[in-house]
Image: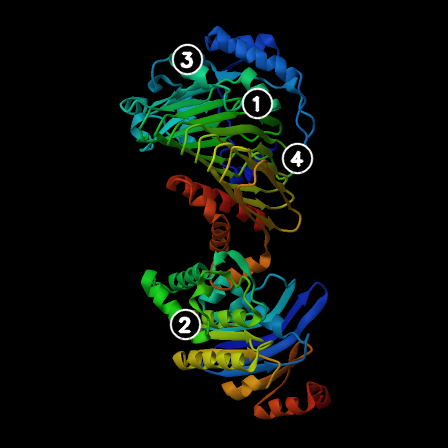
Amino acid sequence: MNLLEVKNLRAKIGNKEILKGLDLSIKPGETHIIMGPNGSGKSSLSKVLAGHPQFDEVSGEVLFESSFAMKNLFDWEAHERAHQGLFIAYQYPIEIPGISNRSFLEETLKAQCLAQGVDAPVGDEFDALIRNLSKHVGLTDDFLDRGLNQGFSGGEKKRNEMLQLLLLKPRLAILDETDSGLDVDAIKLISQAIQTYKTENPESSLIIITHYTKLIELVKPDQIHILANGKIEKSGGYEIADMIEKKGFNYSEVGK
Amino acid sequence: MSTKKALEENKNYKYGFETHLETSDFGFGLDETVIKKISNFKKEPKWLLDYRLRAFEYWKTLSEPTWAHVKYPKIDFQAVKYFSAPKSETEPKKSLDEVDPELLKTFDRLGIPLQEQKRISGVAVDVVFDSVSVGTTHQKELEKYGVVFCSFSEAVEKYPELIKKYLGTVVPYKDNFYAALNAAVFSDGSFAYIPEGVKCPLDLSTYFRINAKDTGQFERTLVIADKGASVNYLEGCTAPMRDENQLHAAVVELVTLEDAEIEYSTVQNWYPGSKEGKGGIYNFVTKRGKCLGARSKISWTQVEAGSAITWKYPSCLLVGAQSEGAFYSVAMTHDKMQADTGTKMIHVGPGTKSTIISKGISANQSVNTYRGQVKFMKTAKGARNYSQCDSMLVGDESSANTHPGIELLNNDVVIEHEASTTRLSEEQLFFLQSRGMDAEQAISLLVNGFCKDVFKTLPLEFSVEAVKLIEMKLENSVG
């Protein structure tokens, strides 16, 4: 049984069609890479799946496995999708001054634990957990007491997203250009966090949206897709990454 | 207002109901006769009537202040009723048991039960309905400690010396247009005196209710904390939904002697008008505290969530050496509401200290202005002020203004000022939702995060209520 099935997904903002009949399936435990030129609809895909309100029209079908049955993802509100185990690491994580990173993380975990009917770690237990995870993604304790992403550098924001990934243990994580704008060391840190997540959650799946082939070598994906012009143009293995590395995204144009 | 629309708006303002009672009033308009009638009704001594008349003469020479960042049609002060009371309240009565059941029911519905067995424990309440105080709870209990808590009218009768000594010493009638108007026509309000060395065993509270149509409410509150005394004072207010604007022009005076402390908290929830800006209360209030004694403290905490227009600057005169003033404020405006609010901290004594934390939230097409003045007199050597003014904009049609002012007559002072403007966006809400919080939790987290420095200064029950109030208003504005 698939974890996610996307069939003929279309999305519009105003009159502009951004996703134009996208198909994608992913099984539990798989890692998929989505590559594609700017403006091809990569970020829109993750936003549509997460339930972002910016789209005026969404059609097609998205099924998500829940209690061993495929359910319509669009029946759930954004927070319910999160409860079902969908997680997006955003390309541009938002800053919210006033809410400390710590209380945000605590509230988030609490909301998800409550939905799953398990006790959320509180007090010292939460503190220990969060300190340990922070260390893992290379964030120091004082980040916890700052406003959510407030004044964080691009790299720190991305690490904070990875911290949330490790904390929330989603069943499907979509990493939207998490590696963009990072130096080599930071990319290594991100890929280590991804490895940790995969090892600790072997049944969980990953969709990694990226521009670069660097991360591909590090995470060893099961499939690579080319997203262009609002749909998946090509799917396959490492050979696709090789082609892109050599010829750029024009490859897909050539392929048509 | 059509019934359907009224019902719709009622969901947003559950205090918008009206109590139908037989009332007495002195008709529309203001002249000496009306003032004499008010004074006569309250059987006031001559000195107080003279005070009112002096204030009235002075008021007639003034024109309305126009410097605030608010817009409204000119008020016709002759089209306002200056006194209205339920008929039953015009008869003498001995105890709360004799209060008109209809009034008791009203306060029940507002969550302020007056009957002995239902009262909120730990809080003594004085309830003011239009122009009269209906009753004060827990008086006997407070008497044991020598604490006086009663309506202003009762205080004039029983404690004339205290009233004479302090009335108008913090807010003189010459202070401003509305202070003069209030001094001329004030009807009822609360009076509290905490004797030397007494820590008031109960929180004191006044609940103001405007009910009658076309009527203004002009209450007067005076709280005095004698040497080493301390008290928590809470204030709440609501009004029915009406298409016409109603005027509320109150004066609050606080006095602390040596080492005394007053914490004064307000949750202001007057009817804000309809979504289209029809009706609502004009809340033009002068509140000021005087830290007369050395090391005394006055702190204002206000949650401004209602009123069509709020014009209000709870201030502190820091006279005593090392005295401290504080102003903590959350002002929320939505739809067509306007607020011009802030504080004045006047440092007179040496080593005086003031803290200002102001949080403005403006949603829809509302306008929210912070206006502050921190003044250091020549004598205020070694004084210090910390100010923090933050604005949160919700949506892209609202506006926020900040006018902090500092005046220095000596240079031996420390001043810190911080200010910020943030925008509560759909993006922030979505982000929190996509991490598993529902809209309510997300808004709550955002509001609490923004306002926590102010909310934590409120007494617990008040704080819970205030958070809920702001959250509900924001939910309506965002979703």
Residue type pointed to by label 1: Ala
- Check the image and name the residue furthest to the left: B144
Q: Does the residue at mark 3 contact the one at mark 4 (Cβ under 8 Å)?
A: no
Chain containing the residue with disc 2: A
How far apart are the two marked residues, 3 and 1, measured between alpha carbons? 21 Å
Identify the disc placed on residue B179: 1
Q: What element carries label 2?
A: helix
Q: Which of marks 4 and 1 is nearer the N terminus?
A: 4
On whether disc 3 and disc 4 are found on a single subunit, the reply is yes
Residue at the location (38% across, 42% down)? Answer: B460
Left or right of B244: which side holds B460?
left
Identify the disc placed on residue A133: 2
Residue type pointed to by label 2: Leu
Identify the disc placed on residue B160: 3
Front label number (3 vs 2): 3
On whether disc 3 and disc 1 are found on a single subunit, the reply is yes
Q: Earlier in the sequence, mark 3 or mark 4?
A: 4
Q: Does the residue at mark 3 contact the one at mark 1 (Cβ under 8 Å)?
A: no
Q: Which of marks 3 and 1 is nearer the N terminus?
A: 3
> Is residue A77 in view from this perspective?
no
Give the crowd class for mark 3: few <14, some 14-19, many >=20 residues within 10 Å.
some
The residue that disc 4 covers is: B70
Image vertical order of residue A90 relative to residue B133, above or below: below
Q: Is mark 4 on a helix, strand or loop?
A: loop
